[in-house]
Image (spheres, rainbow, N blue to C red):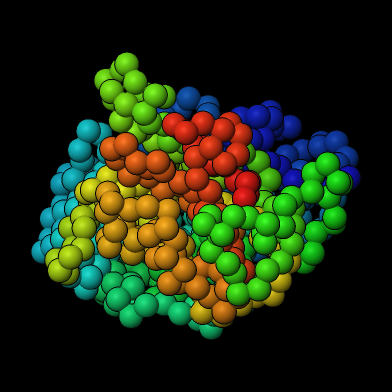
Amino acid sequence: RVVRLSKGDVLGGALPARTVRLPGTGRYTFPDLEAGHYSVLAFMDLDGDGSLDFDPVEPFGWVADEAAGPAAVLTPGDPATGSADVVLRRPRPFPTEDRRTDHGALRRLKGLPVLQLHGTAEERGFAHGFLVGEQIIDFFEFYVLEDSWQSARRYEEEFVPFLESHFANPPEYLAEVDAVVAGMRASGIDMEVPWLGREFRRVDLLAINAYIERRAAQPSPPAEAPAPAQTLLPAQTLLPAQTHAPAHTHAPAQPSLPDGPQCSQFALWGEATRGDELDGGLIAGRNMDGEVDLRKVTVSHFLVFAVDPSEPGRRRWVSTMWPGFVGTISGINEDGLYSMENAGGTGPGPVVDRLTPCAWVQRYILENAGKESTPESIGRMIDGFGSAGGGSFGAGSIILWAVPFHGQQAPAFVSEGDRFGTALRVPGEVAPASPFQIMATNHYMTY
């Protein structure tokens, strides 16, 4: 049977069946291959060490069946695979020198690229696009098209219509998105997306910010009934104080998640941190395992955003994401309100309208809530983004929220939900039951 190469195989987990070294661009041949199925990958060995390297990134590519597709399965002797061109590409690194423009700067701080933005939504957006436009296109091509959708055709046929017809994007969000695209164009970069045969435009930036909503673009079929020992409590059995009732209640299905390792996070405080430098204060951390692409663009293009909104009453916030993100799923504001998302499953149901990207929901709350936040107050803000299905998150989302600990009962808590409903989980509610810690993975514990 045919087994496609995994990312682990390509990145060193499997030895190649054959290797050919070329002095430069030209023809290549693999003679006398044994019968079977093969894939062809190539890289430009800039440092001559015989291995594919990512610091700096070496040009890399493979034979694919379609634009932005995974490595094709080739069969020796099949006339259709007698000729196989490989295009070598690489993400463009952030500049090493500081760059500045009105309302923004791209700098290196403690070894990390930091994008500092200030002013109105339009001013911040323009500076964002002007300073990192090339890297926005890189992230879109190599992560959204090539890693997430694995097909430029499917992206255009499925995701673009979904983004244009099923979202209720707030005007403020769209104004900043449009300003980012305008800033990219004003910087003079090439806006062409070769795999799409057109220029980068608004919908592509919306796709970056809604990449996790890809899982909401198709109906969710009912899952097989779990064995009795694994049965999950139905949503309606939750305590009212911990539940934000969906428009209609459904029995949760077994979570449907991508293969491979995913995300986890925790918060500890009080007795759990007593006796060290925190002196009972809260510490939170997250591990973001799901976003791993073959070209490692999620590593090379990791970007810290430091945002100072000029709109009255808005809090400053920091986000650790990638170029093009107007929202965030990994952020903290100046009051210490922390909000970070893990992927969750979803119960059976249709595609729904009036969706809002999770990244915008979290960014809005970071700008408009502070250290006084409670599970109830954050729950009310989340409910303000309810979709036509009753829930506030298109794809299943599990978000850990935390604030500095000053003796309150729940300085950290978790929201769990999808496009059909939302629930809140507080410390001590599930194992490991402790009043001084809470943890989250990709699994619902109360919803």
Q: Quadrant of the N terminus?
A: top right
Q: Residue 70: percent from the left, percent from the top? A: 65, 53
In the image, farthest residue toward the bottom: 165
The residue closer to the viewer here, 32 or 193, is 193
Q: Is residue 311 left or right of residue 324?
A: left
Q: Residue 309: percent from the left, percent from the top? A: 18, 63
The residue closer to the viewer here, 293 or 70, is 293
Residue at 71% of width from left, 71% of height from top? 349
Q: Residue 11: percent from the left, percent from the top? A: 59, 34
Residue at 53% of width from left, 83% of height from top? 165
Q: Quadrant of the C terminus?
A: bottom right
The residue closer to the viewer here, 35 or 319, is 319
Q: Is residue 54 left or right of residue 63?
A: left
Residue 133 vertical placement versus 334 (above, below): below
- Quarter residue 78 falls in: bottom right
Q: Is residue 355 left or right of residue 85?
A: left
The answer to whether residue 1 is seen in the rendering is: yes
Residue at 32% of width from left, 26% of height from top? 280
The answer to whether residue 359 is seen in the rendering is: no
